[in-house]
Amino acid sequence: MSNTPHPYIGFGLGLRTCYFEEILATQPNVDWFEIISENYFVDGGKPWHYLDQIKEQYPIVMHGVSMSIGSTSDINFDYLGNLKKTIDRVQPMWISDHLCFSSLGDFNSHDLLPMPYTEEAIDHLAQRLNIVQDYLQRPLILENVSSYLTYQASQMSEWEFLSELHSRTQCRYLLDINNIYVSARNHEFEPETFLDAIPQQAIAQIHLAGHSDFGSHIIDTHDQPICDQVWRLFENFAKTRGPINTMIERDDNFPPFSELMAELDHARAIAPESWSVHDFA
Amino acid sequence: MTSLEQLQKDFVEMLSQDSPKFEAHIAAQSGLAPQQRAEIYQNAYRIRLTKVLEQDHEMLGLYLGDDLFEEMVKGYLAIYPSCAPSLREFGNRLPHFLSSQSPFKEHGILQEIALFERLLLRAFDAADSDTLQFTQLQSIQQTSWPNIQFRLHPSVQLLTCHYPAVESWQALKSEQSPPSPENTTERYWIIAREQDKRTGFYALSKCHYECLKSIQSGLPFGFVCETAAQYTDSEEQGMMQVMELLQKGIELGWLQSNIELLQA
């Protein structure tokens, strides 16, 4: 499986149904859009009607939520078949999913359940990643998930786990800086320690999103504006790195499109000049 | 069983059956206790799936009211946990649940409202297909008509109701009181995606419903006309009904463009 770096294409937004018509009507200054892969596991109708038009005008990236790559159940080839069919139609710049498990046997939690940070889990993920990438004939980027618990079994930190998996497989990550912030608050570690530990060549994309703060813990709801602490983490991280594809992710409580554009423009403004997409045209 | 398999099994049993075994896997940390940390995942699981049913069955939710809807979700989740990667499929067995579980099964209209809402969803993202045009009919030779096989558009869904389920759905949608849920005469409906991709639905006569059923099962035009004749007073009237249906079907995009001439 080729592991050539993913191209740098700038600053993107999550494509959600409520914005379809506005995007087509106004052609906003967005470098690319990210779709939720499973939303297009359907035969036709409105989702494809709009995506077919939008993908004529913008690069598209596919982001899945249900692969369950960390599950100890058999790999779901029906799911992978649907994913491959969707990839063939969308022709995305790259594809990603989450470093977690979400299903076991017939049961699907529709949640991103954390893996224990163990050698056993690294072996398991490395093996499954190989099978999935061979089947899809393209690299799969993995996103770090938020977590609310730590396993007794864990033998290393999450960043050591990611680094080790990268060393073993050369896989790349979609670093969700909000998720890192959420986990850092819930487990009392320094988010900068996590970010600093991931080598540049292991990062293909960044997500920026919001969360809900309950005082004793915070939950990764992706339904709020990006908070100041996450903006600061991104700004400081970006200063130390070469350009990384960056995206604003909103999954619920959708604001007017202009608010997401303002967040996107803020990300552009605080990123180093070298991240300007025009330098790569 | 490996330790990873055991951990995942215990996690899933905590979510689906409230099993306490999983807590032993959680390390003690300052702040929340292991039980509270597990509960975050339990709550997220229930909230996420409840939200799916609320979104997919908005009018059923209004019809039932908050308490009964919650009872329905709890019962449904216990019997039919999600088993597909797509949340879109989670509610597929809700009509069956409502027709087989107390107290819901005593109210037949509930199953019909849920089924109607599932069919709306099915029509929404069914496959696309070119629709039949009037000009195509003009090129059919008169002798070929009996052997022409029409096809329904993939988005077309046919529904028979014994209760005023669709009328109740419409009333709730327009913030009116639903009619009395009495078991009355059968009602027939077609649900299909329209040219502008919105999902529409129309009441059908028994004759038109049966004709569409005939088309759906692949019968040629001659048999469709025979079906129509059974529900009218004469063959001529049956033919008129079929022509009326064809006209409506072409206008509203219920038929596919790929008609076929079957061998006699």
Image (spheres, coloured by chain):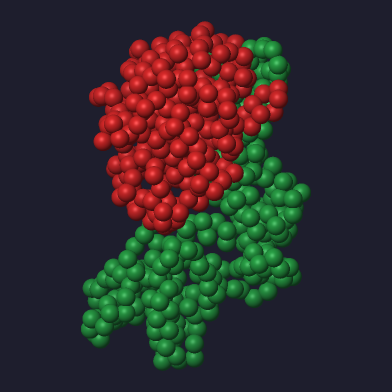
Chain colours: A red, B green
> In this picture, is B83 found above or below A193?
below
Quadrant location of the C terminus of chain B in the rendered image: bottom left
Q: Which residue is at 40% across, 81% downward?
A: B247
Residue B177 position, x and y percent, is 73, 68
Residue B85 visible, this angle: no
Q: Which residue is at 48% across, 63% downward?
A: B198
Residue A9 position, x and y percent, is 32, 34
**Between B26 and A94, the one nearer to me in the picture:** A94
**Between A253 and A152, the one nearer to me in the picture:** A253
Which quadrant of the structure image shows residue B252?
bottom left
> In this picture, is A237 found above or below B73?
above
> In this picture, is B256 found above or below A182?
below
Which quadrant of the structure image shows residue A46?
bottom left
Name of the residue lying farthest toward the right: B67
> In this picture, is A22 found above or below A190?
below
Q: Is residue B57 left or right of residue A118?
A: right
Residue A24 position, x and y percent, is 40, 54
Residue B159 position, x and y percent, is 54, 66
Q: Which residue is at 72% across, 46% downward?
A: B70
**Between B260 and A18, the one nearer to me in the picture:** A18
Residue B213 visible, this angle: yes
